[in-house]
Image (cartoon, rainbow, N blue to C red):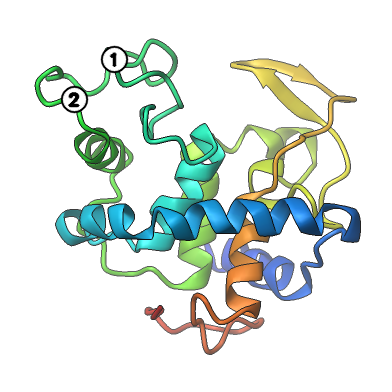
Amino acid sequence: MAKFTPELQTEYEHLFASCRIAPEHLNDVLKTLDKILFGKIRYMAVTAVSEVPWYVIGLLHSMESGCSFTTHLHNGDPLAARTFHVPKGRPLIWNPPNDWESSAYDSLRYQGFVDLKDWSLARVLYRLEAFNGFGYRQHGIFSPYLWSYSQHYTKGKYVWDGKWDPDAVSRQCGAAVLLKKMVDDGVVAYPGALPGYRDAGASA
């Protein structure tokens, strides 16, 4: 895993500040945000026990399963059983419980996100990228998990676990792009969401 460094923090802040949604994808972005906002109450229930901001949970839910509440937050596998893709066999104790909220909490705990206090902008982007993995960096591109549908990403994708295709193009809006639209629309408030931002909090 890449370490969170001042250089990485500056990278995230500059990418976020300059991020622009590709016009041809704007409608898709808006539809995805509607799905996230529809699930806000359920995300907030998980926030209450994990301290992970609701919008971070919503962004992960969108990326992993298109906001479906019938799948595990870990990777989009069906809730009917423990996960069978990476991470495999989660939650360790399952059925019962078998509800989405319990699985979501397990996913956040597995990632080490539970009870963390610093959810500043760069930290959020770092953790979103960490959730999917830093493998794109070895190919010299910014992760589509964050930046797809913006000018920061063109092509190159892991088409399944460990399988790289340099010509594949992500057909899913990146989490950072969604967050950028949330900030621009006032859904999430990062008062200093510009290069040099260092505040530890965000409100919604």
The number of discs equals 2
State the SS at label 1. loop
Q: Residue 139: percent from the left, percent from the top?
A: 78, 33
In the image: residue 146, left or right of residue 151: left
Q: Nearer the viewer, residue 161 or 100?
A: 100
Q: Nearer the viewer, residue 10 or 33?
A: 33
> Is residue 155 depicted above or below 33 in this figure?
above
Residue holding disc 1: 80
The Cα atoms of the two marked residues, 1 and 2, are separated by 7 Å
State the SS at label 2. loop
Q: Residue 180: percent from the left, percent from the top?
A: 65, 68
Q: Residue 124: percent from the left, percent from the top?
A: 47, 61
> Is residue 85 depicted above or below 154 in this figure?
above
Q: Residues within 10 Å of mark 1 (few under 14, many from 20)?
A: few
Residue holding disc 2: 98
> What amino acid is labelled 2 in the image?
Asn
> Is residue 160 depicted above or below 28 in this figure?
above
Q: Residue 48: percent from the left, percent from the top?
A: 18, 61
Q: Nearer the viewer, residue 143 or 185?
A: 185
Looking at the image, do the residues carrying marks 1 and 2 touch, with CB atoms under 8 Å apart? yes
In the image: residue 178, left or right of residue 71: right
Q: Residues within 10 Å of mark 2 (few under 14, many from 20)?
A: some
Residue in the image at 44% along x and 14% along y: 85
Residue in the image at 90% along x and 54% along y: 24
Residue in the image at 68% along x and 69% along y: 16
